[in-house]
Amino acid sequence: MKKNVIILGSTGSIGINTLEVVSNNLDKFNIFALTANSSIENLSVQCQKFNPAYAHVNKEEDAKKLSLILNNFHVKSKILFGRKALNDLVSASEVDTVVCAISGSAGLESSLHAVKSGKRILLANKESLVMCGKLFMDLAKKNKATVLPVDSEHNALHQCFSLNNKKFIKNIILTASGGPFLNTNLDEFDNITIDQALDHPTWNMGKKISIDSATMMNKGLEIIEAMYLFELELNQV
């Protein structure tokens, strides 16, 4: 029986990659709903391909635009908008798996509703754990929700821990693949510009995430994420 999947933030990089995985496993997964902030054109293309039961955007005017586009292509997805509709969507009884890929604090509320409804959570939104990690994980245990990290470092750790009892882990190391200043001489750091910090050599990210990467602040957030995900002490990470 196919698993019904909701992708929160389907037009971002995590969402796009998730849809590629689903495309190769259509016998196992069904796209129940796709959501985006305001990327109407990209979302409409995804809806035409996967024909989800629901599509969601934040604003009513964007919902109207999306509805017109999909009507022209005879796509029958029901269009929703607003916070309440999103929270109701991730809580729907038909849903098995929720991919939480809305970036930043904007992804917290819907992620918490998915946890409260006992879903299988594929978590790409580390800010949820940074802001309220203990609450998030306690709710997951209480409601028998499964939280699986999508971030590459944490997913690799999860795969290791799935075969080994955590009590035998002395410590873990989070790697850094290298941002724009990987090979920059320390003597040049005083002259670094904002534009240089935003110019990541590999990823095209938003301004905040790019700066967090360039300054290594992102690794600090990942340490907090790892502590809550794997119930580790600070000196173990």
Image (cartoon, rainbow, N blue to C red):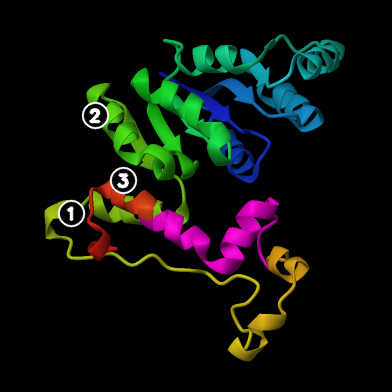
Question: Would you say the magenta stretch is mainly helix, strand or loop?
Answer: helix
Q: Is residue 51 visible?
A: no
How far separated are the C-alphas under marks 1 and 2?
Answer: 20 Å
Q: Residue at x 64, y 45 (%)?
A: 13
Residue 204, how many percent across, how many down?
70, 56
Tell me which amino acid carries mark 2. Answer: Lys
At x 60%, y 70%, the residue is 179
Which region of the structure is painted magenta?
201-223
Quadrant of residue 160 within the rendered picture: bottom left
Where disc 3 sits, the SS reads: helix
In the image, residue 17 sits, relative to residue 34, either above or below, namely: below
Would residue 151 be seen by someone viewing this image from the given angle? yes
Q: Which residue is mark 1?
A: 164
- Which amino acid type is shown beneath numbered disc 3? Leu
Q: Which residue is mark 2?
A: 141
Whether residue 162 sits left or right of residue 120 in the image: it is left
Q: Residues within 10 Å of mark 2 (few under 14, many from 20)?
A: some
